[in-house]
Amino acid sequence: MRNADLEQHLDAILRRAPLRMQVLEMVRSLALPDWAVGAGFIRAAVWDELCGYRIASPVDDIDVLYFDPEHCDARDDEAQESKLRDLAPALPWSVRNQARMHIRNGDPPYGSTADALRFWLETPTCIAVRLGQAGQLDVIAPYGLADLFAMTIRPTPSGHRRKADYTARIEHKRWHESWPNVTVEYP
């Protein structure tokens, strides 16, 4: 399937998930620069649909990403999380400015939210979505959507470089227990 077709399929899945759309609307209301919501929040929605689950799998956190090199203090992230908790206190918000995350990960500085995603460890997690002002869903997927829809966990170049971190993540997350159709490739 072509990536454009997979983007349409992702769009349809997210629009059928009222909570996912509400989250995107809440995050959009913050007007963060170069923002998106990604990782497990998107991945779980797709895998739940592919497995035919009627009840959404719980997510550990809602990864809110943005890129603002002028405000790299962790307290700025905490302030944005506080705003989101005011809007939806029961949701597990996690806000991170990608302009500073390269330091924690030992990577060269990132140039944008999309650039930061390229350095995440596994391909089906390197996907984020933002809700445009006209209501369109803009997908950021530096490695495409094929692995997400194939339920294949494959290392990115960073996953190959950081093999121990990749393997530890696979073992810790235990995705195959929630979604038995998942396959994992190791570097």
Image (cartoon, grey):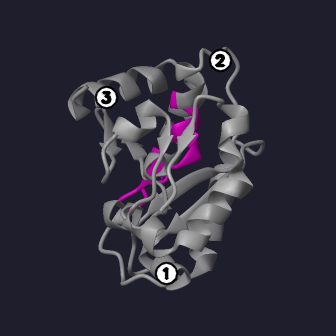
Which x, y percent locates residue 102?
46, 79
Which x, y percent locates residue 174?
71, 46
> Residue under circle 2?
53
**First-in-chain label (3 vs 2):** 3
What residue appears at the point 78 percent right and 42 percent down from the top-left corner? 90
Which x, y percent locates residue 169?
64, 60
Quadrant, the N terminus: top left
Residue type, label 2: Tyr
Which quarter of the figure has residue 183?
A: top right
What residue appears at the point 44 percent right and 62 percent down from the top-left corner? 66
User: Which span is picked out in magenta?
Assistant: 28-46
**Drawn side of residue 173 relative to residue 5, left or right:** right
Disc 1 from disc 2: Cα separation: 39 Å
**First-in-chain label (1 vs 2):** 2
> Residue under circle 1?
72
Badge nearest the viewer, 1 or 2? 2
SS for callout 2: loop
Which x, y percent locates residue 51?
59, 20
> Residue under circle 3?
6
Residue type, label 3: Leu
Which quarter of the figure has residue 179?
A: top right
Tell me, yes or no, whether the two marked residues, 3 and 1, touch with CB atoms within 8 Å.
Answer: no
Disc 3 from disc 1: Cα separation: 34 Å
Tell me, yes or no, whether the two marked residues, 3 and 2, touch with CB atoms within 8 Å.
Answer: no
